[in-house]
Structure formats: C-alpha cells, structure tokens
C-alpha cells in the first residue's frame, strides 16, 4: 500500500461532499467527519507503509527458518520433508484440475443451455454409464492420492534403527533435551528463548531503529546439536500441558503430551541451522518456546559431545569429596529451601501429619544412617517421599543442614560417601 493513495481518495470524498446541496451547518459537520476520516486513513496508510518498509529493510530470510513473505513450505532438508512437499503439490494440482473441470463443465452447461435461447431440459432417469463413471473416477482419484500419502505416513512413523535417540520434553516455557542413546548418551540440558529477545518482546517488540536480527524469537540459549546424515529419533513428552515439537525443514511435527510418550524421527541431509517452534497452544508464552537444531558434521558432533561431557563432569559433584560443616550447611540450606520447606516449613516445625524436623529424635539421633535411610526410601508409604533423585552431595548437605539448624546442634557431619554407601 502506498502512503499517497489514502490522502488522494480522501480529497475526492471531500470534493463530493461540497458538491451536494446540504445546509451550511450539515456540510460543516460532514466536512469535519470527513476530515477526521481522511486523517485516520492517512495515518493507517503511513503506518502500514512504514511497517512494510522497516520490515523489508530490517529483517531478511533466516536460512533454515522462516523467509520474508514466504508462501511455500520450507526448503526440505530431509527425505520426508521432500516427499511431504511433493504430496502437497501433487494434491494441490489434482484438486485444481478437478475444480477447473467441474466448474468449467457446470458454467458451460448453465450458459449453453439457458432458457433464453430456448433450451429444453433433457428428461431421463438412471444412466448406468454415468453412474459408473462418477463412481469410478473419484475412486481412482482418491486411491491415487491415498497410496503415496500412506507410504509417506508409514515412513514418517518408522522410528526403528535410530543412530541417536533424544527425548524432547516440553515445559512451560522451554524444551528439555536428554540424549538417551547413541553418541552423546547422558547429555541433557534445557533450551530456552534468548533472554535479550524475550525482554525485547515483553517491552512491545523491537523499537524504532532496533534491529531484532533475522532469528527474532527463534534464538535459544543452547541449541539441540545432531550429526548430519544420521537417523535421529526424537521422543516427545511434556511436563505440564500439551506442547508440540516442530521443525518444518525436517517435515517433523509431533505432539508432546504429559504422561505419554510419542516419537518421530529425521535424518538431516545438510549441515546447517534449522528452526521451529512449539506448535501446540500451551499457555501465555507459547510463542516463546523456539526450537533450534544445529546439524553438524560427524566430526564436529564428536567434538561437541566431548565438550558437553567435560562440562557435565565439572558440574557433577564428586561423591568422594570430603566436606567441612560450614560448606555443607550452605549447600544444604538451598536444597532444603527448594525441596523440603514446602512441607516441613522453613522453621522446621512441620504442620499436621508432616512431622517436625526441629528437635526430632530421628534427626538428633547419633546414628546418622537412620535419617539417611528415611531420605533415600521415604517413610510412611511415601507420605514422606523418597529423595533418591537428589545427588549424594545434595542429600549429605540437606541432612547435615537439618542436623545443625534451628535448635538442632548435633555437630554431626554427613559426607556424600556415606549417602553413596547407603544407596547400595
Ligand atoms: C510432600 C511433603 C514432604 C516433603 C517435600 C518432605 N517431607 Fe519429610 N516428611 C513428610 C511427612 C508427611 C513425614 C512424616 C512421615 C511419617 O508419618 O512418618 C516426613 C518425615 C520426615 C523425616 C522423619 C521425621 C521423623 O521424626 O520420623 C525426615 C528426617 C524428613 N521428613 C526430612 C525431609 C527432608 C530433608 C526433606 C527435603 C529433602 C523432606 N523431608 C521433604 C513430608 C515431606
Ligand atoms: Cu509449548
């Protein structure tokens, strides 16, 4: 839309307003209304053109992601995506041909046999030939579309013999990735929207002169990394509500449902960055859960895996480390606040059926193994849940904390090695 079009039309309208024969008063109010209308139109036109201009200048196509004014499907990077695109065009063409033929015949018949040229309607019943034709032809068309479509759907669902299995967990509002099998097994991390972009969006989007980048709202802090030309099986599930894992360039879109496991797969044929998003409306920040898959060479993938493993080793606590009381207390305070305070209260007094930890005989007991056992196995049929999922160090820290906080002053220190030993 050009910014000149609207004022020009508005002037015409004003001119028409003058040429009609209303009273002076009426003409005046009318002129005011028209002026206001013209102003609104002009503002809208200027806004629209500026949006169009700034968009055209600031944002370019994102390779592997959306393109500016994109109409077609994403360029395919997997065999499946290629086949999907082929199916899409094949069916679109068949539908168009059917549409043109049917409507062509219909309009031709209406025109040719119209009453005004004296056409008399034919009057016949039951034509076996016609009935056979209009049964057979659509049947063939449906078969012609269903056969190749079924082939592709079956291929999409064949997740066997994957080189790499990754679990993608949707959560409000980020993705969790766990490498379950194959090279990189054990790696696990979260992938969330780039915080700078989130702030930009929360503040109403990129401001005048701010260049948001072509990957606006698609940039993540840590992309999923996979090797090229390997079959990657993605298992999807969710922690809270239904999400969906979608990467258009791979032709992959799979619901991630809490309590259920679904899977899909892809074999990316080209090194590069590919983008997608959560594709199931999952709450107020649905637009803030982008997916970024980095496809790298086998060699680079190996390097990435080594790097991740080193990072993980550095982060994981060494259960053999011997701690001093103060450090364990500091660590334990945090573990307690996140895991225990909700039930046992920050003051350790508990509430109702939740037993107090402050001044509790079991906590004060000189035999440390008693409390270790409660933490590892729970108590009273899970009323007190087991905390096996916490690390040895976290358990040692939180037990030491409860033994030396509030009025509890046992001076006892529980080392991670003791927890590790009790696990067996
Ligand atoms: C979901 C609520 C809940 C959470 C969270 C919870 N507890 Fe408990 N805990 C209980 C209940 C309930 C009991 C009492 C069980 C019983 O009846 O024997 C209990 C009992 C205990 C006992 C035994 C007390 C005694 O005198 O027998 C210890 C020790 C304990 N909890 C420590 C912890 C620690 C440490 C954490 C955090 C890692 C924690 N609890 C988290 C509910 C909870
Ligand atoms: Cu979602």
Image (tube, grey):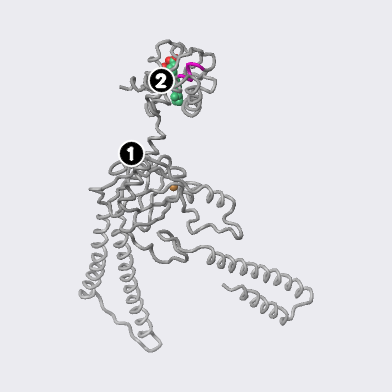
Which of the 4 image quadrants contains residue 257? top left
Percent x, y of residue 137: 24, 71
Percent x, y of residue 70: 44, 65
Residue 118: in magenta span: no
Instruction: Report ligand 1 position as a quadrant.
Output: top left
Indicate left or right for 420 with 37 as reference: left
Q: Can you tell which mark lies on residue 186?
A: 1
Of the residues tagged 2 and 1, which is closer to the observer? 2
Q: Which residue is the extreme one toward the right? A: 24
Residue picked out by circle 2: 415
Q: Quadrant of the C terminus?
A: top left
Percent x, y of residue 117: 38, 89
Q: Can you tell which mark lies on residue 16?
A: none
Which of the 4 image quadrants contains residue 77? bottom left
**Residue under the image location 54 percent in, 66 percent down:** 57
Under circle 2, the secondary element is loop
Indicate left or right for 87 with 23 as reference: left
Q: Nearer the viewer, residue 283 or 341?
A: 341
Q: Nearer the viewer, residue 417 or 41?
A: 417
Q: How many neighbours does mark 2 have within 10 angstroms: few (below 14), some (14-19), or many (20 or more)?
A: many
- Distance of label 2 from label 1 (alpha carbons): 26 Å
Circles 2 and 1 in contact, beta carbons < 8 Å: no
């Amino acid at each position: 839309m050009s910014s000149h079009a609207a004022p020009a039309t508005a002037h015409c309208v004003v001119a028409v307003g003058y040429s009609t024969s209303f009273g002076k008063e009426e003409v005046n109010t009318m002129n005011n209304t028209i002026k206001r209308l013209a102003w609104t139109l002009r503002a809208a036109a200027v806004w629209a053109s500026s949006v169009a201009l700034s968009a055209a200048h600031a944002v370019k196509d994102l390779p592997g992601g959306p393109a500016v004014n994109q109409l077609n499907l994403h360029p395919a990077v997997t065999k499946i995506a290629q086949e999907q695109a082929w199916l899409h065009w094949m069916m679109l063409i068949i539908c168009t041909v059917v549409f043109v033929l049917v409507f062509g015949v219909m309009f031709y018949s209406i025109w040719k046999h119209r009453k005004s040229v004296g056409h008399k309607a034919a009057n016949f019943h039951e034509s076996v030939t016609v009935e056979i034709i209009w049964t057979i032809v659509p049947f063939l068309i449906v078969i012609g579309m269903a056969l190749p479509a079924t082939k592709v759907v079956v291929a999409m669902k064949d997740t066997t013999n994957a080189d790499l299995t990754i679990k993608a967990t949707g959560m409000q509002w980020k993705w969790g990735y766990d490498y379950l099998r194959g090279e990189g097994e054990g790696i696990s991390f979260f992938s969330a929207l780039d915080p700078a972009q989130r702030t930009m969006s929360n503040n109403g989007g990129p401001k005048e002169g701010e260049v948001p980048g072509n990957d606006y709202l698609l940039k993540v802090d840590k992309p999923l990394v996979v090797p090229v030309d390997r079959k990657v099986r993605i298992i999807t599930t969710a922690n809270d509500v239904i999400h969906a894992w979608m990467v258009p360039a791979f032709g992959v879109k799979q619901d991630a449902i809490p309590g259920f496991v679904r899977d899909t797969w892809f074999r990316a044929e080209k090194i590069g960055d590919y983008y997608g998003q959560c594709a199931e409306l999952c709450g107020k920040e649905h637009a803030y859960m982008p997916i970024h898959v980095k496809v790298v060479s086998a060699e680079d993938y190996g390097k990435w895996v080594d790097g991740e493993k080193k990072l993980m080793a550095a982060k994981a606590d060494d259960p053999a480390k011997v701690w001093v009381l103060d450090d364990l207390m500091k660590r334990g305070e945090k573990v307690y606040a996140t895991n225990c305070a909700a039930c046992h209260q920050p003051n350790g007094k508990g509430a109702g059926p939740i037993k107090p930890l402050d001044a509790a005989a079991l906590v004060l007991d000189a035999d440390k193994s008693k409390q270790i056992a409660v933490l590892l196995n729970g108590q009273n049929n899970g009323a007190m849940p087991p905390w096996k999922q916490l690390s040895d160090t976290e358990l040692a820290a939180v037990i030491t904390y409860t033994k030396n906080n509030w009025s509890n002053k046992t001076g006892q220190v529980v080392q991670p090695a003791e927890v590790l030993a009790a696990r067996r």
